Every structure is written in C-alpha cells, then in structure tokens.
Image (spheres, helix red, strand yellow):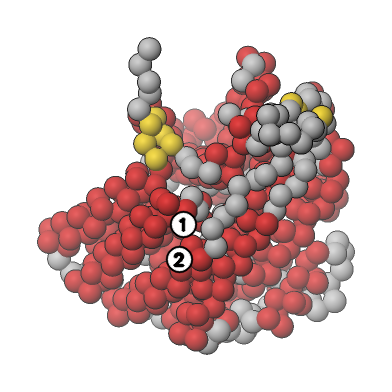
Amino acid sequence: MKQKIKVDLNILTRTFATILIITLFFVYLLKGENIYVDLYTVALAACISLLTIVFLVIEKRRENPFVILLSLYVLLFYVFRVITLNIEPYTRGMNFVGERTVNDVNSTLLFILFSLFFLFMGLVTIKIKKIKTSYSKLREGNYSAIFMFVMLSFLVSYLFELTSMFGGNKFLSYYLSIFHPAVVLLFFLVFYYVNKQKAYSKNMIVLLLVVLLSYVLLTTLAGGRKTLLSIIMNITVIFFVIKSRVYLSLRMFFIVIFFGGVAFVLYDISTFFRWMKYEQLIILNESLDFSSLFLTYLDKGLMQTEGFAKIFDRIGFLDYEVDSMAGADLYGKVINPLYYLKSIIDNIIPGFSYFDVVRASQTKFFLQEFGYVPNNEEFRELNYNSQYIGGFSEMYTLFKGYFSIPIFYLVGLLFTYCYSVINLRDPYYAVLLRVLILLSFVGGAGFLESFGFDWHVIKLFFMLIAIILTYPLFRSRYREEHKTSSNINPVLNIIE
C-alpha cells in the first residue's frame, strides 16, 4: 500500500518565503517604482523573508509553533502586501492621517525587520515542552448536549445580528460577549480533535460538517469577512498543540489552496451582505430577505463588490501599521496604559461605564477626523466599529519608537514560557489553554493582529468566563492508568 507523501509546514513556509523573494524582484523589474514602493522597499521585504527562513531552519530542530505561525503571518500580510502594492498602488488603510509615501512604508518595514529579529530570538530561547499528562482512554462526552449548546449560540447570534426584532438586545449582546460563535466553534473543535478516536465515527464527522457549514453561513450572512481564515487558523493551531508539527499531504495542500480561493469569494459576498444589513436593518428597520439579497448580488456580478485591489488592501496589515506608526503621536492619546486600564474597566462590567471611554481601536476614526477622544454617546451616534492598530506599531507607540525593540524579545520569551508550562490533567483543557496562548499571539485581536491591548484583555476576560461556565459540559471523563513505564502514553499519542 502506497504511503501518502506529506510535507512539513515548516518546509512549505520556507518555500513560500523563497517564492516571495523571487516575486518581489520580478514584479519590481516589471512594474518599477511607485508612490509606495521603491527598490529599498523591495530589499527590506526580501530581508524580512530571509529572516523568516533563517529562524524556520532553527525551528526545525526545536518544534516551536510560534515561529512558523509568525513567519506565515508576516509573509502573508506584510511581504506579500509589498508585491500587491507594487502591482496596484491602491490603499485605504495607509492614508488616514496625511498622505503617506514610500519613505513611510520603508520606515515601517525597517522597524518591523529589527523587531522581528528580537521577537524570533525570544521565541526560540526556551525549548517548548510537550504535554506530559497521560490517560488510557477518554470516555465519551455528551456530544448531543455540546451540539445543542453550539447551535444555541449560533441561533442567538442570528437573532442579534440578522433580525430587526432582537437586533441590539442588551441581554443577547452580553450573552454573545461570552459565547460568541467564534469562541464556541473553537471549544467545539478542540473537543472534537482531543476525542479523535471517537471523532472519526461517521456520526461525528457529520456533526463536524454541520457545525462548520452553519458557522460559515451565519458569519457570511452577518458580514463577517474572516470566516474560512478563522477556521483554518483554529484547526492549524489545534494540530500544532496536539502533534507538535503540522504536515500537509498533496491532497490537503490543494484543498487548502482551493479554500483560499473560496475565501476571496466569501469575503466579497460577506462585504455585500454587511452593507445591505446596515442599510435595511439599521437605517430602514426592515427584515432581511436573504434570497432576494443573494439574487441582487449575483446580478451585480461575482467579485464586483470590492474587487481584488480592495481585498488586498484589507488583508494588507502593513498599510495599517504604516498609518499607526506615522500617527503615533496622535494615537498615543489612547494607546497608553492609563487609557487601556479605563477601557478594560468600562467594558467588562455590563451596564457600567465609570470613565465613559470606548476601546482604543474604536477611537481611531475620531482621532483621524476630529483629533479628539469620543465618549460612548458620540461613538454610538457615529455608529462606527473599530480599526486595526497592528502589533508592531502598538509596541512602537507604547514604548516610544525604537526603545520598544528589546521588549519584543521579552514578549517572545513570555509567550513560549506560558505555553510550555501548561500541563493540566484534563487533556481537553491542556490543549485548549495552549491553543488560546497561540491564538493570543497570532489570532484576531491578539498580539500581532492587534486592535489594542485593552481589546485583547477584555476578550480574554470573557473567554475565561466562557471556560468556567462550560466546564460541566466539556470536561473530560477519564480513567488514569497506573504510573508504569508500560502503560503511560502521552495524550498526544492517544488522539493520533
């Protein structure tokens, strides 16, 4: 029987970095300079790619998921963005405060290059320990109750996001602060893969597909634009925790490429539904006719809502880093420890607002347009949500420019230390907490994809509440073996 050829994600990431280096210079030779890209820009982006390759080679011997995830993040959202900017110099995220030029882009890339080196160094300083807890067999969980809990959260989200009757309901809003569909999906996926022996039964696979398709449908209709990306990210992170390394077969590689293409289409559709939802639900206070809206979208044409230039701008986190770093003095009014503390206090207690402040990323528009920090009433009147800040520029603002460079080393050290020391008896929570640390590093509203440190702390606070409240539902029921050399099997082997 033929063995499937599998390739380590580390090798694939190095290959991707090499392809990007070649493409950077090829596109530059083809297109030349423009307002945002010159030869120095290309050289800096190539140096960042080379840096990821060097540390990926180091990672190969140390099995450190942070290094691979950081490399993928930087290559996809920063280096690749230089290529798309060179092809089409279109940006919305860069010019919020004044017109930015190639010098601003280069200054940002240079800072990212230095900070990346120290961040990588911090990540590889500690060798990560595997989960040591061992059990002979995980008993079956209450899959029916878990499935009902997941679908209930999806239903609440639908009522809150997509109906005029329950839209804006304060009780549902606070419920979703704790049991947001993305959080509930993460809990479900961790439970599914930790109980992998049972999970591969036909019924469990059907259950998984129902949950995933329901999440994709709900998030797309509600205007969420990271649907497939968040699913792929969650599963990848879970695999890193369980297996230490992630391998892709040839079939799986093409499946990922396929869903990457589907993600662009879903992004366009969800953007259209986001606009229509705002117009019909918020402005006109009408119920949504989804079949009619979808036919309207098809009449307009596939990929005609935003187009590739705007999509590449949206996933070009480099643009927002340039804006945040160039406007550091202005944004420093809210990107500071005191404001973060006020924001955290005001946003974790329902119905309480002692300081009358909104989250840091929600004030960016006011600072850009009016130059002042709004209160809650002014924010609600404008009905604006949030803007990406960026982890590199947030550190730049917090620690006064290049003084922040050594702090990146400490951040990398802290993440790997916290990840390594988690060794709980319950395999579900051992995996879940390690997953949360990885997502806190690279996931939405985390350290790298930052919407402000206050947003991250608030998110983790509600996550902790969700973990506590769902403990009776998700805790593993197990039988611990006698501690002899013949019967101690790591939980990682059990779920293979």
Image position of 352 with respect to 172: above or below: below
> Crowdedness of circle 2 by 10 Å Cα count: few (<14), some, many (20+)?
many
- Residue type at tag 2: Phe
Q: Is disc 1 in contact with disc 2, using a CB cutoff of under 8 Å?
A: yes
- Kindly identify the residue that appears in the image at 61 percent across and 32 percent down: 493
Up the image or down, 278 lies above or below 103; here it is above
- Give the residue drawn at x 55%, y 35%: 293
Residue 324 at x, y percent in the picture = 48, 75
In front: 344, or 250? 250
Give me the disc on residue 434.
Answer: none
- Left or right of 74 in this view: 447: right
Q: Which badge, 1 or 2, is on the more N-terminal residue?
A: 1
Label 1 crowd (10 A; few <14 / some 14-19 / many >=20): many
Residue at x 26%, y 53% (from the top left corner): 18
Q: What is the secondary structure assignment of the residue under circle 1?
A: helix
**Residue at point 68% right, 21% down?**
198
The kind of residue on which mark 1 rests is: Val
Q: Which mark is residue 67?
A: 1
User: Residue 168: x, y in percent?
Assistant: 77, 51
Residue 356 percent location from the top left of the image: 79, 76
Quadrant occupied by the C terminus:
top right
Q: Is residue 167 visible?
A: no
Residue to which mark 2 is pinned = 120
Classify 26 as above or below 485: below
